[in-house]
Image (cartoon, rainbow, N blue to C red):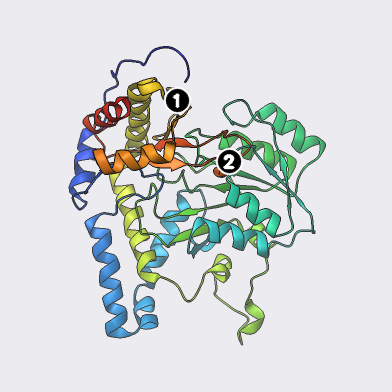
Amino acid sequence: MTGGPALPATSGLPHDDLGDAWRAARPRPATVHLDSAACSRQSTAVLDAVARHARHEAELGGYVAEQAAEGLLQQGRSVLAGLVGLAAADLAFTESASASVRTLVSRWRLAPGARVGVLPGEYWQNVAAFTDAGLTPVLLPADALGRADLAGVERALRDDPPAFVHITLVASHRGVVQPGREIAALCRAAGVPLVLDVAQALGHVDCDLGADAAYGTSRKWLTGPRGVGFLVLRPAVGAQLTPLAGPELYDDGGAGVEHARWYESHDAHVAGRIGLVLAVGEHLAAGPDRVRTRLAALGRATRERLDGRGGWRVAEPLDEPTAITTLRPPDGVDVRQVAARLRSEHGVLTTAAGRERAPRELTGPVLRVSPHVDATAEQLDLLAAALTS
């Protein structure tokens, strides 16, 4: 969305009852929190559940408390995996999205130098994980927004297929949704596994798209604790991985251990995992479709209000169905200084996203705005006025 005068702020926000309930379920914020793509606000119930399990560890012993919570954790595996179209046996809790991708590529039995198909806007830490594992990222075609060119992807998969394709469904630096379902169909037809990074997508957009593996984090749109993530693997992919400590170490050969559980840390922040399970339950209770609808409307309302304000330009199309808006600065404006001023002078929390996040797409830092469902039109107006000043 570029050029022309700023559009009038005419978008209504659907499901105000959802926004009200979300707000009431959380501690009162000290800022106008428009930074959910970095870290969302946990509910009071999630905070209490995390604290309660930590107390149980002190009272019962850490491993006894974990065993007592196993039923809840297994329910959480089932529900969380179900959001990407897989089953409880396919999910491993991890410490973060970054830990998940490192585990995946370090344990996958691929030939040295094996090629990984990525888009030009791939997150830099993912690319670093691939190269560190001895893999070779190769670019798949994309349009000017960074969205996959499906015809070009189909040709690449037909003519010179990589070992697997890795797609970040919603990027860190730009709120554009990739056509994940269509890419999954192309990969399936070519016999190439598809891995989805859903760190910015789960709890935000539909992620049940037919991928062979997916991974993400608790702290963003699912509004769970930090320090918790997940890795989900179809059994066919799991069969190509070698766990660091596998079934051969057990007297019974690891009988009864679900295939993804070999990739869970046993020295883990279990209280955080419980918090994530509770947060996913809250997401389901709110209604994923309702959440997605309100987030998309907030994204549109943000773009309407901010494009052209003070010379800032919005990168995303007006109707992109995400709540992430990235703003290109006017010439000579330091994005990091602006983000600091918004926080210190106006009490508005945003992110200054540096070029390093996607060096093939960004020419410099951008200001990222990412409200969750509890945000209001008045808060967006406050940010618009602050940018103008």
In the rendered image, residue 74, in percent from the top left (x then y), is placed at: 42, 66
User: What residue is at 76 percent from the left and 35 percent from the top?
Assistant: 156
- Cα distance between the residues tagged 1 and 2: 20 Å
Foreground residue among 359 and 25? 359
Q: Secondary structure at mark 2?
A: loop
Foreground residue among 80 and 99? 99
Say which quadrant the C terminus sits in: top left
Q: What's the residue type where badge 1 is placed?
A: Pro
Q: Image height check: is 91 above or below 165? A: below
Q: Is residue 167 visible?
A: yes
Outermost bottom residue: 251
User: What residue is at 48 percent from the left and 18 percent from the top?
Assistant: 2
Residue hosting label 1: 330
Closer to viewer: mark 1 or mark 2: 1
Crowdedness of circle 1 by 10 Å Cα count: few (<14), some, many (20+)?
some
Q: Secondary structure at mark 1?
A: loop
In the rendered image, residue 185, in percent from the top left (x then y), is placed at: 64, 37
